[in-house]
Image (tube, helix red, strand yellow):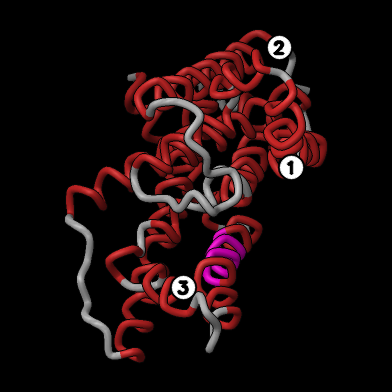
Amino acid sequence: MMIRDLAAAVRAEATVQSRRPALGVILGVGCLLMLTFAYIIPAVGADGGPGEDRALSSMLPEQFLAAPLGPLPVFAGALALTAGALIAGSEHVEGTWTTVFVQQPRRLVVHGGKLIAVTAFAAVMLVLLFGVAAAASLTVALIEGMPVDWPPIVDVVRAYGTGWLALTMWGAVGALLATAARSVALPIGIGLVWILAVQNLLSVLAAPLLSWYAEAQWLLPGPAVGSVVAAVGAANSAPGVQVVADAGPAALVLVCYLLTSTLISGWLVHHRDVC
């Protein structure tokens, strides 16, 4: 019975979210930003310059994993958090929770459907980022007459799994913020300020001055994401990509954030008045 109800909730969420234009815009913006920073700017900036060979090598198929992984600690993470807040918080904004629950599905079942939608969105977003990056790298190699050498499939699968964990964590955090605030705009604003400003300022200003923070910053979501993606192919030059801990402990931190966000948001939906 529980599994059947959850499957129905997932189908309902798939129908609702597939008709939400904002999620499509998020996917398009993510791909456009990745192309801009990983391909267009390096190609234009290094054209005929001393760093042309290095820029060209970073855009070839052999190195294409760096393109979709590099944005995950900062702007791709911010987009995933925004999507999570939209998926989980729209019912509060639109005032449709009462309509949903009057049909007598269990609250946790409905919320579980939303969290599965968040994980599915993260998977789709990462597939698009990987696909666009692979197509762009192949195009560069064909134009420049360079060999088309792809990384081993094991490395691609490992990179995809790591990226999916990172994006799902950001989406779950966005869902928690939206559930706690019963809105969409406020949690998105808080999340964007944290990801795009606060965590970078802490890394640049606090880490060099406070030794205890420098040693403990890997416990924060942004630095943890930066550490795990650096271990599977992200370039250290990308914003937020910095090895501050081993990949194993950093991945465990992401799992803890994911589980904690899921449990707290589920508790809020189950025990709190949603109106």
Residue 107: in sight, yes or no?
A: no
Helix, strand or loop at disc 3?
helix
Of the numbered discs 3 and 2, the one sitting upstream in the chain is 3
In-front residue for pair 275/66: 66
- Queried whether the magenta region covers residue 34, the answer comes back as yes
Q: Amino acid at mark 3?
A: Ala
Mark linked to residue 272: 2
**In the rendered image, the vertical position of residue 61 relative to residue 81, given as above or below:** below
Helix, strand or loop at disc 2?
loop
Q: CA distance from mark 3 to mark 2?
A: 53 Å
Q: What's drawn in magenta, residue-wise? A: 27-35
Q: Give the quarter of the image for residue 270.
A: top right
> Looking at the magenta stretch, what is its main secondary structure?
helix
Q: CA distance from mark 1 to mark 3?
A: 30 Å
**Residue shown at 63%/51% (left/top)?**
75
Q: Is residue 90 left or right of residue 136?
A: right
Residue 69 in the image, given as x and y percentages of width and height: 44, 51
Q: Do callouts 2 and 1 mark residues in contact (Cβ within 8 Å)?
A: no
